[in-house]
Image: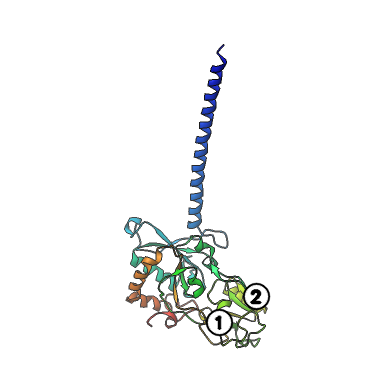
Amino acid sequence: MEPASSNKNLYEKDASVRNGNSKLLLVVVVIALCFAIAAFILALVSLVTQKDGSASQINLVGGAAGLTTADYDDDKVWLIHTGHSGTNSEYINEETGRVEGFNPDIMNAVCRIANKNCALVFDVYTNCWDNQAGESARGGFGLMAGWFDACGAWRVKPDRQRTFAFSDTFSRAPFHAFMTLTGNPEGFNWRDITGKTIGFIDGFSADEHCLAKADAVTGAVLPAENIVHCVDFEECYDRLVANTIDAAFMSVSKIRGQSSVEIASEEFNACQVQGFGMMARFDNKLIEWWNPAQEKLLASKEYHEICKDVKIAHGHMPGYEPADFCIGL
């Protein structure tokens, strides 16, 4: 039988080996966890979930067809948010499933000129900019969290400039107006909206803060109980039909071409300081290459062709006239 001291040494060696194995296992688990988190974040960036729960298609728009990553100026895919406004500015083509319109045409051209690999990512507008009735408007969670490099074609407003950086503008800003059902059956008087309930499309520039700056409108500063935020144009229309709002306030481009509603006021610009541009976080590099490429586009014949397509390729959709918002027309 071995001495007690020898048994003790063997026990201590055994314990040391077990401790070493435990530490190694812990390191392996931590590394695996890091990889899992990284994969999850990449999945969030690459797949944007639609309302029906399905993953939306990503439309590669930068560069010519068939280019590989090595053919671009860098190896990054630049993610640009887009949505469905139901107008000729941007809409879902039901046949192709792609987002089309003036804004995607502009973004496609700028990315090609800059030799960047860009992808349009479809998501709700409130992931770019959000506001709740009676509260200050604020940056949308998606852009703040870095899901996108930029949100495409957003109006430049002072409150947004406090939160995000903007590119130079590529179009003028259309005016805002009140909307009622055709014929204004309830006799809505836009000059005095005291006590009236007004609808706004959530996240859009024509919000209650914009309306509050309209000097020509008495009662323009609405209490929270008289502010209704709609998810989209259709919800505001349904609320007009149900008589749960007296009128809606939005861009005239949303109202034009719609037979069931009409512009029920003067058209005015109460809030935006410029037109439409790209909206990005201050630490994102997209605007650095975007502005020079956009400047080349605006000086070219291609820009005017894109403007003409507002009424040709996209003329079946309601919305803008080229002269309403194209620079130089």
Element carrying mark 2: helix
Image coordinates for residue 87, horizontal then vertical, percent: 50, 75
- Amino acid type at image mark 1: Lys
Image: 28 above or below 231: above
Q: Quadrant of residue 295?
A: bottom left
Horizontally, residue 23 falls left or right of residue 189, namely left
| Figure quadrant of the C terminus | bottom left
The circle drawn on residue 213 is 1
Q: Residue furthest top?
A: 1
Q: Few, some or many C-alpha atoms within 10 Å of disc 1 (few <14, some 14-19, many ≥20)?
A: some
Q: Is residue 58 above or below residue 256?
A: above
- Across and down, in percent, residue 44 comes to 51, 56
Judge from the rendering whether residue 171 lies leftward or rightward of residue 131; answer left or right. Answer: left
In which quadrant will I find the N terminus?
A: top right
Mark closer to the chain start, 2 or 1:
1
In-front residue for pair 161/103? 161
Q: Is residue 173 left or right of residue 185?
A: left
- Residue 324, placed above or below residue 56: below
List x then y, in percent, for residue 323: 42, 83
Labelled disc at residue 224: 2
Q: Position of residue 229 (x, y in %)?
A: 61, 73
Tell me the kind of residue under disc 2: Ala
In this view of the protein, which residue sits in the foreground, 298 or 158? 158
